[in-house]
Amino acid sequence: MAVAKYRRVLLKLSGDFMAGESGFGVDPATVDQVAKQICAALEYDVQMAIVIGAGNIWRGSNALARGMERATADYMGMLATVINAMALQDSLERMGVITRVQTAIEMRAVAEPYIRRRAIRHLEKGRVVIFGAGTGNPYFTTDTAAALRAMEIGADILLKATKVDGVYDKDPLKNPDAKRFTHLSYIEALNLGVKVMDSTALSLCMDNGLPLMVFKLSPPDSLVKAILGEPIGTLVTREGKSAETTP
């Protein structure tokens, strides 16, 4: 069996991966597909933590447009991430993977409170840890929460799963001639205004030298390829190779 390039990883999933064809809510069959990819990656003796967004349940930007206070909208989004975390936990445990959900906002009836050393201990024991409720603070996205938690647990890389196969110089859905970057520096990614990861999260990665990989969560072996270090998606590190693009 191949050897994983990364021993401990933080996987960032958007809430969209929890929804079915309707694009809203939690679809158990769709969640199971994500869980199967995680199970396949765990076969390579990888320690995995996960942060999930909540776009399938709640989009704060829509509420803000209708006059809701930002802090209130953000707290509601944090609660929605816990619903997604519990759904993924249920799917993984039905597949035989011991999983713990930790939340930045205490809700002990359904999850552990986030405690860094306890999270690391869970990982060392081979448990998957799902971090819910973002950072516990408004004005921060789940991308930022993912970068923060990745550094706190000493992850080797932050894996950002998306619905596009990397970072492009322009929107590939609107521009057929868009080119994909295979390797960028943090500064290059920031200057491009990369929309798959917010600038605060990118800056945190840059300040702490945390590698970031942006990749598409399909086909079904994509996560395995990512943890094996295969050339999939876009790798963002201190040393960039902005000239290295693919059509």
Image (cartoon, rainbow, N blue to C red):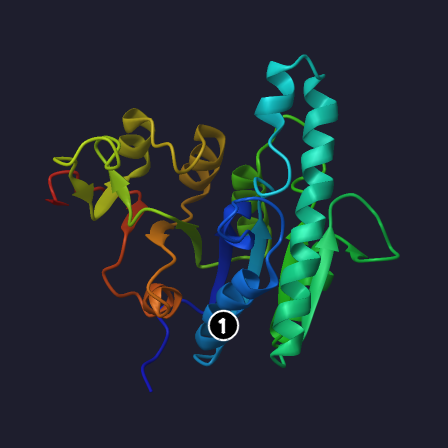
Task: Residue 52 in the image: state x and y as whole percent.
Answer: 58, 50
Q: Is residue 121 visible?
A: no
* Element assignment for label 1: helix
Residue farthest to the bottom, as pictured: 1
The residue lying at 49 percent from left, 30 percent from top is 200
10 or 15, nearer to the observer: 15
Nearer to the camera, 115 or 159: 159
230 left or right, relative to 134: left
Which corner quadrant of the image does residue 123 belong to?
bottom right
Position in image of residue 126 (x %, y %)? 61, 76
Q: Quadrant of the C terminus?
A: top left
* Residue drawn at x 55%, y 65% as measured from the top left: 29
In what quadrant of the picture does the N terminus appear?
A: bottom left
Q: Which of the 4 quarters of the picture holds residue 128?
A: bottom right
On screen, residue 99 versus residue 52, left or right, reads right
Judge by depth and name the residue closer to the eye, 25 or 117. Answer: 25
Q: Residue at x 30, y 31 (%)?
A: 187
Residue 195 versus residue 132 in the image, above or below: above
For residue 98, above or below residue 20: below
Question: Residue 95 or 230: which is nearer the viewer?
Answer: 95
Question: Where residue 39 sits: x, y (%)?
Answer: 51, 75
Q: Amino acid at mark 1?
A: Lys
For residue 202, side relative to residue 238 (left or right): right
Q: Is residue 29 above or below residue 84?
A: below
**To which residue does mark 1 refer?**
36
Q: Mark 1: give few (<14), some (14-19) or many (20+) Cα within 10 Å.
A: some
Q: Which residue is farthest front? A: 22
